[in-house]
Amino acid sequence: MNVDITGAKVFFTIPTGIPVMGDILISETLVVSWIVMILITGLCIWLTRDLKVENISKRQAVAEMLVEMANNFVIGNMGEKFRHMIPFVAALFTTSVVSNLISLIGLRSPTTDLSTEAAWAVVVFIMITSQKIKAGGIGGYLKGFTQPIPVLTPFNVLSELATPVSMACRHFGNILSGVVINGLLYAALAVASSALFGLLPGVLGDVLAQIPFLSVGVPAVLSVYFDWFSGVMQAFIFCMLTVMYIANAAEG
């Protein structure tokens, strides 16, 4: 819904709960993604303030450790010639981790929306394709689809297109499954709590049955895996696939 005031349009939230601005839908995923980027930017600014050569602070030590880890990861898996990829891979990993873990503060993780992973996968796919063309030229890249025999060309094309699809769906599926399992667990424990305390007689049972006591504790323990471990691991896997695909593409 919008209202035209002196030629300027004022936009409100439409019944579906998605604000609109012209033809652009401002979804929850988009808003939280911007929050993630602001958090990462703020963290980088904080970590890199007042850098020194000697007598460095603990904050600078942490920053240097993170940079060293990124250097070792990229160069160790891709080689020295791919040093320029370090900022990209580090940004991809950090964005994925923060996006996965932001659900811990009650926000919906952007990675539970397939469009997020799909956008990342498309960027990676373009980089993979550019490396293949750089290594063998356009002719060599197109000729690769006819190997080992021309009749397999359609299958090779499908295999090429399957790369970004599989990367996106793998990351999305694992993150979303954790969210769904946690949601089902909360609901099941709430029902069990209501049924258990509802057995108490009188008003006491009626009151306590409305409080999901069993939802406290158990989900927090499982969150260590579904949110922390799984979130970090899926970010690592996505980045590992990225560096391996690009490195292999450069070899021709």
Image: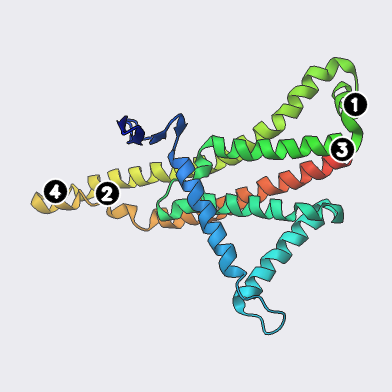
| Residue pointed to by mark 4 | 206
Residue 217 placement (x, y as % from top left)? 37, 58
The label nearer to you, 4 versus 3, is 3
| Residue pointed to by mark 1 | 139
Q: Secondary structure at mark 1?
A: helix
- Mark closest to the chain's N terminus, 4 or 1: 1
| Residue pointed to by mark 3 | 134
Crowdedness of circle 2 by 10 Å Cα count: few (<14), some, many (20+)?
some
| Residue pointed to by mark 2 | 193
Measure how far apart labels 4 and 1 are at the Cα level: 75 Å
Residue 233 placement (x, y as % from top left)? 62, 51
The label nearer to you, 4 versus 1, is 1
Crowdedness of circle 1 by 10 Å Cα count: few (<14), some, many (20+)?
few
In this rendering, is residue 93 above or below 49? Answer: above
Which residue of the protein is positioned furthest toward the bottom in this rendering?
Answer: 55
Q: Nearer the viewer, residue 176 or 85?
A: 85
Is residue 128 visible in this depiction of the protein?
yes
